[in-house]
Amino acid sequence: MIRRPLSYVALVIVLPLGTLMVLAALAAAYRGSDAALALLVVGLVGWTIMLVHNLRQLVIWARQPVGTPVPQVEGLWGRIFAEIGDRMQSECEVKERLSAELGRFQQAALAMPDGVIYLAEDDTIEWMNPMAEQHFDLDRRKDLRMALPGLVRQPEFVRYLAGREYAEPLVMRSLRRRERSLQVQVIGFAGNRRMVLSRDVSQLERLETMRRDFVSNVSHELRTPLTVVCGFLETLIDGLDDFGRDEVLQYLSLASEQSSRMQRLIEELLTLSALETGAPAPAEEQVDAQALVRDVVRDCELLSAGRHEVRLVLEGGGELLGSHKELRSAFSNLASNAVRYTPAGGHIEIGWRSGAGGGEFWVADDGIGIDSAHIPRLTERFYRVDRGRSRETGGTGLGLAIVKHVTTRHQGELAIESEPGRGSRFTLRFTPARVRPA
């Protein structure tokens, strides 16, 4: 369709109208009425001049920027100008709304946590968001209009894209970052165009690995004491009349110890689960720090049963803001670990110190110590430096994981110092906001 300028349109309209005016004047002259002819000619000339003037105004206004006020014209032409102005304003508003919607859509796509790539029919990139750049190591400044299979040269991805079978997503490793796993899904739209969606599933894979390890560890930890309990019970059931009272009591005592170990493991699992899943923290209390530490020392002495020298150090009092139950659990875990991993005759120091810099609780011993290579992993669930020794002493492998989570929930810091053969020192430090002077 050929678009003509408005000046050309005006000329095409004015000339036929002028011709009609001349024909009308000739008809009046033919009838012999000079006065009528004169009036008619004057009227037609005046009407023609007004018509040309209004058309010229329309042409000038139409060439102005969008939003220029409509010329003030009276009569029929005023209504024409108003109608055209209203239509142009309406179309302008629609265009602005569509532009705003498109802008919001693009902003949403740019902010998406998943990668998005639009492909043309020939697999060239039409558009991508920043996350797709990271996932596929692309650059929007130079890779647009380039073929995606030529940029992402991973055989499994090229086969997946060319196979046209997109019912199941593809999981693949990033070429440059092998620790990153991507889940890729292709969706067809607008004819033969396609949209490539990518998602980083590295964390999900790590969580799945942790879940499998957790189930395996829990099963193993429960199987051993359960086997012992079942074995003792079966022995007693099969030959109760063959055992004396002392032997029966010994078997029942050993079975009771293993049952307590399983119960302790389950309780610590429930505690750790509540801490790791972000369960709401209990109502904060003003915990008497010295009283809490004294209780922990008494428990430590009972567990030691006189095999160790336990020393209490208190330097300042005050109140520790937090959950008494969780803090007691963390402090007790550190104290019981010191008892378990310090040979008989060893020394254990448990203390509390408070001042302007906050407060700290510590447990120090001169036990077997820990090699520095193991320290970064001590707070992992079920991580043990010596599995055999830990089970012999009744450890569950969850104590330090609980300590770490409790400390974090109380905005504290866990510090570990240890040397093989010379002992260990575990310190929980709390900020001044958590410690109130006595």
Image: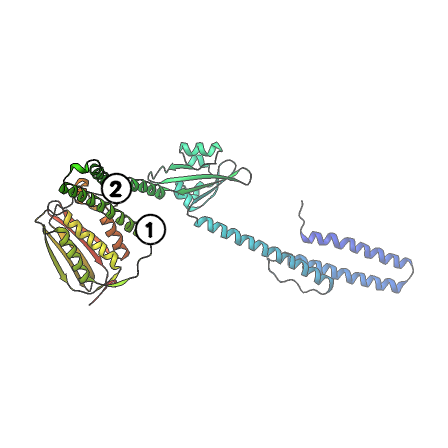
Q: Which mark is residue 222?
A: 2
* Neighbours of disc 1 within 10 Å: few (<14), some (14-19), many (20+): few
Residue in the picture at 78% in, 55% down: 17
* Neighbours of disc 2 within 10 Å: few (<14), some (14-19), many (20+): some
Residue 268 point in image, percent of width and height? 26, 49
Callout 1 secondary element = loop
Residue 3 point in image, percent of width and height? 66, 48
Residue 46 vs residue 275, the one in the foreground: 275
Residue 355 vs residue 26, the one in the foreground: 355
Question: Quadrant of the image for the C terminus?
Answer: bottom left
Q: Quadrant of residue 245?
A: top left
Residue in the picture at 30% in, 59% down: 282
Mark 1 or mark 2: which comes first in sequence?
Answer: 2
Q: Look at discs 1 and 2 and give the one toward the viewer.
A: 2
Q: Furthest residue to the front?
A: 241
User: Is residue 114 toward the left or the right of residue 350 in the image?
Assistant: right
- Give the vertical position of 95 relative to 214 (above or below): below
Callout 2 secondary element = helix
Question: Quadrant of the image for the N terminus?
Answer: top right
**Badge 1 amino acid:** Thr
**Badge 2 amino acid:** Leu
User: Is residue 434 toward the left or the right of residue 169 in the image?
Assistant: left
- Give the vertical position of 130 relative to 288 (above or below): above
Residue 14 point in image, percent of width and height? 75, 55
User: Is residue 104 toward the left or the right of residue 219 in the image?
Assistant: right
Q: Which residue in the structure is indicated by mark 1? A: 277
Q: Furthest residue to the right?
A: 32
Q: Quadrant of residue 281?
A: bottom left
